[in-house]
Amino acid sequence: MTAIQALTPGIDHTLAELEEEFEVLGDWEERYRYVIDLGRDLAPLTDAERSDANKVRGCASQVWLVTSAGDDGYLKFRGDSDAHIVRGLIAILMRLYSGRARGEILAFDAKAAFGRLGLTEALSQQRSNGLFSMVERIRRDAAAA
């Protein structure tokens, strides 16, 4: 573990921060705008990274996820989508999962987390399925790391 990672709040702390951010916002229209804004801050992927190997299956939109493991065993994730709201969902996933140890990723209950954020009820079934496809991809990559 590096000194920076030792100072990085755990995944549950990050979830609590997201929960507070969502609570400050009023209705879901404001929250959707916020999620879209989060997606605007994602670093773009290169054309080479937008490959079939990085494509996430089970998403209605085009979604790519790039996973890299550091020498310290911590995983970094980057992602992109052709849909604004999905880019925002990717940004939330990156905040929760990127820079975490494999065990922390695998132990995290994403379904409960998204319930706490209200995403489970707010997203269409299709978007919800896509979100969980992204989570499953992250978990698979973590298990394989």
Image: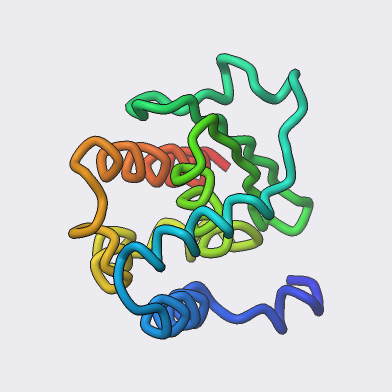
In this view, 22 is above or below 50: below
Q: Position of residue 137 (x, y in %)?
A: 44, 37
In this view, 108 is above or below 9: above
- Residue drawn at x 26%, y 39% as measured from the top left: 129
Foreground: 142 or 98?
Answer: 98
Q: Position of residue 128 (x, y in %)?
A: 26, 45
Q: Is residue 69 left or right of residue 95?
A: right
Q: Position of residue 21 (x, y in %)?
A: 47, 79
Location of the C terminus (image quadrant): top right
- Residue drawn at x 51%, y 46% as measured from the top left: 142
- Residue drawn at x 32%, y 68% as measured from the top left: 113
Quarter occupied by residue 118: bottom left
Quarter occupied by residue 120: bottom left
Location of the N terminus (image quadrant): bottom right
Q: Position of residue 40 (x, y in %)?
A: 64, 51
Q: Is residue 78 left or right of residue 43?
A: left
Quarter occupied by residue 24: bottom left
In this view, the residue farthest toward the top is 52
- Residue drawn at x 22%, y 44% as measured from the top left: 124
